[in-house]
Image (cartoon, grey):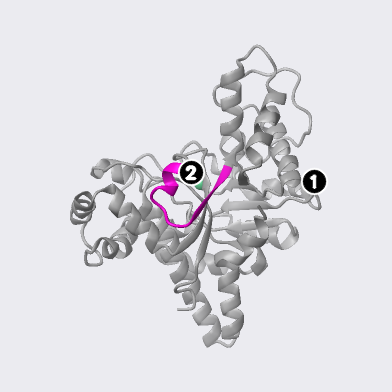
């Protein structure tokens, strides 16, 4: 397939668990819900695609898979699975799942940091205490981290929803929480991220679409960002809509309408398994080809980083084979599209 062997830039992923896992521990990480299981499209994909990387036959049963994983040890299994992705650059969201140095110790290639706004703000609030207004300290800390980062990320979708208030001024009164949920603070924080992002040339990533049980999915539709996107169009920074499912068509529309919008199907592709071709086709109905980015959103299990890559290669490869067979696209143009989504669009979007 055209996608075989193309080098990937994983523009959004997380670290892995640096420990051997028993079956409950492994299965817990196989889901965005409270209890994961091999009994799912994702579980089938682990058995089909990851088993051969650990020298097992495809479709090895869960017990055999986990026994072999334990025999190799987490470090060897992780190294094999991450290497098999064919990723040369990893942009790591360090707000969840461990830091850059730990990941760089097990992954080949360049590892860069994505700074999570809420995580940074909560760290600053914990340090400066609740006596003073922390807004200047948060801005100073963000500027300090921005110089070494490749991008910024917000999980405002989880905290108050993507219909947060648009404001450049911090609130006068605040209830300081260990975990920020106040829309007035979050709206200011996202605005700050957009401004500092524009200044430093850092794209701002948004969690959109499905996620774990902290999320109210109806507040994670990227269409709720329409006013924010109008306000930031022409401001000099890019906005990357992550995951997107089941709103990937809405995200594709936004990328179509606004030049500074990018989208990916990280997290989505491993979870939808066999349906990845369809989901990719739906996103590409309207999204300009330069707006699609590759990511795995792998987190906790290196199996998720690997499945992100292998199912993306398979999904997009099959889709483009169909387009070539129907004479919709030339092979040369299809090759250019693959390279753009795999790494070229990330290079032009993430300039640092
Ligand atoms: Zn993520």
Please tell me whether mark 1 sits on a helix, a strand or a loop: helix
Q: Which comes before the other along the chain, label 1 or label 2?
A: 2
Image x and y of residue 28, in percent: 33, 42
Image quarter of residue 347: bottom right
329 versus 272 height, above or below? below
Q: Can you identify the residue that label 1 sits on?
A: 231
User: Real-space Cα distance between discs 1 and 2?
Assistant: 32 Å
Residue at position x 80%, y 49% in the image? 235
Marks 1/2 in contact by CB < 8 Å: the verdict is no
Foreground residue among 280 and 266: 266
Q: Is residue 288 left or right of residue 113?
A: right
Using the image, tell me which numbered label, if any, was put on residue 329.
none
201 versus 329 height, above or below? above
Q: Which residues are magenta?
A: 100-114
Graded by Cα atoms within 10 Å as few (under 14), some (14 to 19) or many (20 or more), the crowding at tag 2 reads some
Q: Is residue 201 left or right of residue 246?
A: right
Q: Is residue 183 visible?
A: no
Query: Is the CB–ligand 1 distance for label 1 below 8 Å?
Result: no
Number of the front mark, 1 or 2: 2
Image x and y of residue 244, in percent: 56, 53
Image quarter of residue 147: top right
Please tell me whether mark 2 sits on a helix, a strand or a loop: helix
Image x and y of residue 90, in percent: 51, 54
Residue 105 lies in the magenta-colored region: yes
Image x and y of residue 271, in percent: 42, 56
Image quarter of residue 272: bottom left
Q: Can you identify the residue that label 2 sits on?
A: 100
Q: Is residue 349 left or right of residue 323?
A: right
Q: Is residue 277 visible?
A: yes
329 versus 309 height, above or below? below
Foreground residue among 270 and 309: 309
């Amino acid at each position: 397939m055209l996608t075989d062997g193309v080098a990937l830039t994983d523009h959004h992923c997380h670290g892995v668990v640096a420990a051997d896992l028993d079956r409950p521990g492994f299965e817990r990480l196989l889901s965005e819900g409270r209890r994961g299981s091999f009994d799912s499209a994702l579980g089938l994909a682990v058995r089909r695609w990851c088993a051969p990387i650990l020298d097992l036959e495809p479709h090895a049963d869960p017990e055999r898979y986990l026994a072999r994983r334990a025999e190799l040890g987490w470090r060897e299994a992780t190294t094999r699975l991450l290497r098999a992705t064919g990723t040369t650059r990893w942009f790591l969201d360090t707000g969840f799942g461990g830091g850059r140095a730990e990941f760089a110790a097990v992954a080949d290639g360049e590892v860069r940091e994505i700074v999570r706004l809420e995580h940074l703000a909560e760290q600053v609030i914990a340090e400066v205490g609740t006596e003073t207004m922390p807004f200047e300290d948060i801005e100073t800390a963000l500027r300090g981290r921005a110089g070494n980062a490749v991008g910024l990320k917000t999980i405002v979708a989880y905290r108050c929803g993507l219909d947060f208030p648009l404001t450049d001024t911090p609130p006068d009164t605040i209830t300081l929480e260990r975990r920020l949920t106040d829309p007035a603070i979050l709206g200011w924080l996202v605005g700050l991220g957009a401004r500092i992002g524009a200044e430093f040339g850092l794209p701002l990533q948004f969690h959109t679409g499905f996620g774990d049980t902290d999320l109210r999915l109806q507040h994670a539709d990227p269409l709720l960002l329409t006013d924010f996107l109008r306000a930031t169009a022409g401001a000099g920074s890019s906005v990357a809509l992550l995951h997107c499912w089941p709103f990937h068509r809405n995200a594709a529309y936004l990328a179509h309408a606004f030049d500074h919008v990018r989208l990916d199907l990280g997290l989505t592709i491993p979870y939808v398994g066999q349906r990845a071709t369809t989901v990719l086709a739906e996103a590409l109905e309207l999204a300009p080809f330069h707006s699609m980015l590759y990511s795995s959103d792998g987190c906790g299990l290196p199996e998720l980083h690997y499945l992100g890559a292998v199912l993306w290669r398979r999904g997009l490869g099959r889709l483009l084979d169909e387009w070539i067979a129907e004479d919709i696209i030339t092979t040369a143009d299809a090759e250019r599209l693959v390279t753009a989504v795999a790494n070229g669009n990330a290079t032009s979007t993430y300039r640092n």
